[in-house]
Image: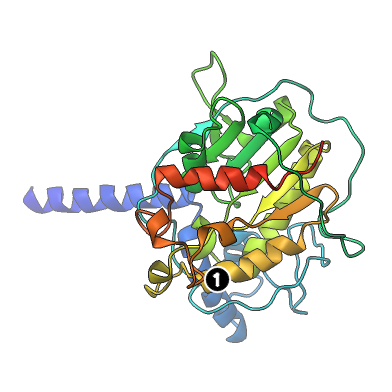
């Protein structure tokens, strides 16, 4: 009986892990290494278009086709091209990230009226935006979408009673719309970001996301999904001005630890995010010059872990946003 108990414990442990990988994580933590394995199999004449190739292709959504063109899930090839990123992109979410969701339904409205504004980053070279300085009430019809950093802005930035936040510590661009993180007044269950955006309308949307994705896939696959997310935001909220916020950097010391979170990798992704701004309905905001020191990384005095801001320094972020607004 003793050996049966040991084996039963192992079976339960493995079963729990499989349930998490299949139904919760959707194998994303292994997506990068498995795609490399898939390419090796294809080169060796194994797998290819069969079950293995099909399964691996479904893990991360986007990849490069045989011609080396940049494609998304709809087959588009007009994505902005970005320089290659450094090696070492496998990994997972940020250490210490937990189930901390900040979400509430915002101003009511159908949110679907208005004309088509086109895709972000397309057409002619955009003119330099003209920013104005605003007060806190500018954010009364604004929505903030993001990960743990945006959760911190909600808690300590002084906008919790003014703006609407759909934020969660583990949020990624890959699961942004189907994450159930938005609370409904009087309701017991939370709804997805997609559902909330269909039920409410906003004049401004602030998006900062990408630090959790540093350990998933490549800069190219991230930017393909980011582009797809911005297009979908425009479809759901065609009247909204969308602010694409640069990924905030980490300290130079944190960047030098040797894992997948590096400022070099963040820079590559930020170049791609900036390219999506058309300066008509989508605008690029980069708070890093305010937050970084002479090393080019996040100022160590502003953070308690090299990644997240100390409570009192979220005010710097808010003040930056207040001086970089588009007049309504």
Between 305 and 217, the one lying in front of the other is 305
Q: Is residue 32 left or right of residue 42?
A: left
The spot of residue 165 in percent (x, y) is: 58, 34
Q: Is residue 242 above or below residue 193?
A: below
Q: Residue 226 is drawn in which quadrant?
A: bottom right
How many callouts does the rendering have? 1
Q: Which residue is mark 1?
A: 265
Q: Is residue 301 left or right of residue 37?
A: left
Q: Is residue 15 left or right of residue 241?
A: left
User: Is residue 244 among what the camera can see?
Assistant: yes
Question: What residue is drawn where x is 71% and y is 26%?
Answer: 200
Task: Specify the quadrant that holds the C terminus.
Answer: top right
Between 87 and 8, the one lying in front of the other is 87
Question: What residue is drawn where x is 54% and y is 76%?
Answer: 36
Q: How is the image coloured?
A: rainbow
Q: Residue 325 is drawn in which quadrant?
A: top right
Question: What residue is drawn where x is 20% and y is 48%?
Answer: 8
Q: Residue furthest left?
A: 2
The spot of residue 172 in percent (x, y) is: 55, 51
Q: Is residue 182 above or below residue 34?
A: above
Q: Within 10 angstroms of label 1, few (less than 14), some, or many (20 or more) residues?
A: many
Q: Residue 196 is drawn in which quadrant?
A: top right
Q: Is residue 43 left or right of residue 16?
A: right
Q: Residue furthest top?
A: 186
Between 253 and 22, the one lying in front of the other is 253
Q: Is residue 121 above or below residue 256?
A: above
Callout 1 secondary element: helix
């Amino acid at each position: 009986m003793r050996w049966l108990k040991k084996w039963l414990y192992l079976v339960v442990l493995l079963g729990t892990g499989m349930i998490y990988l299949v139904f919760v994580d959707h194998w994303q933590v292994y997506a990068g290494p498995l795609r490399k394995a898939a390419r090796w199999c294809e080169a060796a004449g194994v797998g290819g278009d069969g079950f293995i190739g099909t399964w691996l292709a479904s893990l991360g959504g986007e990849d490069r086709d045989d011609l080396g063109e940049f494609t998304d899930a709809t087959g588009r090839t007009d994505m902005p091209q970005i320089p290659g990123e450094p090696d070492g992109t496998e990994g997972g979410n940020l250490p210490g990230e937990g189930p901390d969701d900040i979400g509430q339904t915002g101003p009511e409205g159908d949110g679907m009226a208005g004309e088509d504004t086109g895709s972000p980053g397309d057409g002619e070279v955009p003119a330099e935006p003209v920013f104005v300085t605003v007060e806190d009430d500018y954010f009364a019809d604004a929505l903030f979408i993001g990960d743990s950093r945006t959760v911190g802005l909600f808690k300590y930035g002084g906008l919790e009673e003014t703006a609407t936040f759909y934020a969660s510590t583990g949020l990624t661009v890959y699961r942004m719309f189907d994450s159930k993180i938005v609370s409904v007044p009087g309701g017991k269950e939370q709804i997805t970001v997609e559902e909330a955006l269909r039920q409410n309308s906003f004049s401004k949307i602030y998006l900062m996301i990408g630090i959790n994705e540093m350990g998933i896939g490549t800069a190219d696959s991230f930017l393909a999904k980011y582009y797809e997310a911005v297009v979908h935001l425009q479809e759901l909220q065609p009247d909204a001005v969308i602010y694409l916020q640069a990924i905030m950097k980490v300290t130079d010391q944190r960047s030098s630890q040797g894992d997948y979170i590096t400022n070099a990798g963040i820079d590559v992704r930020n170049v791609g995010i900036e390219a999506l701004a058309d300066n008509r309905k989508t605008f690029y905001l980069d708070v890093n010059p305010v937050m970084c020191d002479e090393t080019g990384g996040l100022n160590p005095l502003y953070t308690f872990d090299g990644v997240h801001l100390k409570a009192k320094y979220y005010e710097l972020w808010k003040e930056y946003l207040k001086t970089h607004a588009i007049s309504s």
